């Protein structure tokens, strides 16, 4: 037998049917079982004998002889392994006797494909070099460390070069929310404009997204901040799709991707 912590802060018990004596269950327990019918009958009988209400025992039966287990059906003790949650964390404290199934989940991230950004920059640089309206105005675009630098001999031309970059980024699937362009500044006789790149979800944005999920998403949905990402979980996979659609419909200040769906 062992206890292992799941991503949803629920502790799980794994063992055998005759090992149920070591699990702390009682009238407040909610049990979720999965297995063949003989196994289910044995476990259900044991749980009822420990005071767990019949209405709090839930099933997913597989194998031959599907049907609702009966408490009065005598079957030989099964050694088939099963999983059962023994403890649940709620508001920072552990509460005894809560049993639950693993939730489905996905992660909300904000990441950049640097190769695609580089491809967009190279395409923009090529267009600027070949366009007639950018000739003899010192127009250009290049990497400057981790940022992009745009230049031209007037503010108007510098912003025009930036527009070319934006067009190439969009065509390569990069959200404009992932860039942070500054204002053109005069440096000698040339106006230069820095374009920062944004990755990761700030704590402020993460809290805002979490609040949207909890307030406007399906009942029982969970959103947990994990560094510069969020993990959304629910017992129903359809709820996760609803949350993704909800967030895609919001005008947020950060570019989001939805990954690790499981």
Image (tube, helix red, strand yellow):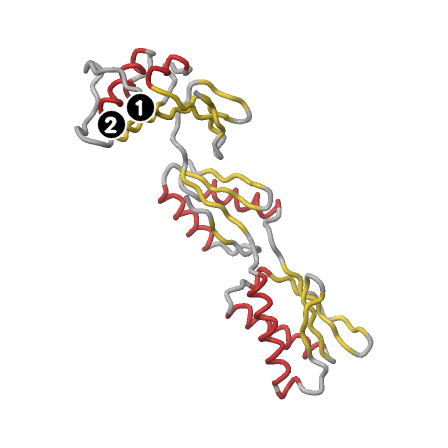
Q: In the image as oriented, which residue stretches furthest toward the right? A: 188
Quarter of the image with the N terminus in it: top left
Is residue 44 visible from the viewing direction of this image?
no
Q: Residue at x 77, y 77 (%)?
A: 190
Q: Residue at x 66, y 74 (%)?
A: 159
- Provide residue 157's location: percent of width, then percent of height: 68, 79
Rendered position, 79 above or below 103? above
Is residue 149 visible from the viewing direction of this image?
yes
* Sequence-first disc among 2 and 1: 2
Residue position marked by numbered label 2 in the rendering:
36
SS label for mark 2: loop
Quadrant in the picture for residue 115: bottom right
Labels 2 and 1 touching (C-beta < 8 A): yes
Residue position marked by numbered label 1 in the rendering:
80
Q: Residue at x 49, y 35 (%)?
A: 7
Quote the CA–CA distance across marks 2 and 1.
Answer: 9 Å
Rendered position, 233 above or below 78? below
Q: Residue at x 46, y 18 (%)?
A: 96
Viewer-proximal residue, 131 or 176?
131
- Provide residue 25's location: percent of width, then percent of height: 39, 15
- Provide residue 143's location: percent of width, then percent of height: 68, 68
**Which numbered mark, 2 or 1, is in the foreground of this view?**
1
SS label for mark 1: loop
Rendered position, 134 above or below 201? below
Please state if 146 lies on the left or on the right of 253 as rendered.
right
Crowding at label 2, few (<14), some or many (≥20) Cα neighbours within 10 Å?
some
């Amino acid at each position: 037998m062992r206890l292992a912590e799941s991503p949803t802060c629920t502790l799980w018990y794994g063992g055998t049917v005759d090992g149920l004596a070591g699990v702390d269950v009682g009238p407040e327990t909610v049990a979720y079982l999965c297995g063949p019918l003989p196994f289910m009958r044995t476990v259900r009988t044991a749980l009822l004998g420990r005071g767990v209400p019949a209405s709090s025992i839930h099933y997913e039966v597989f194998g031959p002889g599907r049907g609702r287990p009966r408490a009065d059906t005598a079957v030989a003790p099964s050694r088939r392994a099963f999983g059962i949650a023994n403890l649940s964390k709620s508001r920072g404290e552990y509460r005894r006797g809560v049993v639950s199934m693993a939730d489905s989940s996905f992660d909300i991230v904000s990441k950049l494909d640097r190769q695609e950004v580089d491809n967009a920059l190279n395409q923009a640089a090529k267009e600027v070099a070949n366009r007639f309206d950018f000739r003899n105005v010192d127009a250009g675009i290049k990497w400057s460390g981790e940022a992009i630098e745009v230049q031209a001999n007037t503010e108007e031309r510098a912003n025009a070069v930036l527009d070319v970059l934006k067009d190439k980024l969009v065509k390569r699937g990069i959200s404009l929310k992932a860039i942070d362009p500054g204002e053109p500044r005069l440096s000698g006789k040339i106006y230069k404009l820095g374009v920062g790149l944004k990755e990761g979800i700030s704590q402020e944005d993460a809290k805002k997204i979490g609040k949207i999920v909890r307030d406007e998403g399906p009942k029982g949905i969970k959103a947990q901040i994990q560094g510069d990402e969020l993990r959304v979980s629910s017992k129903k996979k359809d709820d996760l799709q609803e949350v993704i659609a909800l967030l895609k419909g919001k005008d947020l200040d950060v570019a989001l991707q939805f990954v690790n769906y499981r």
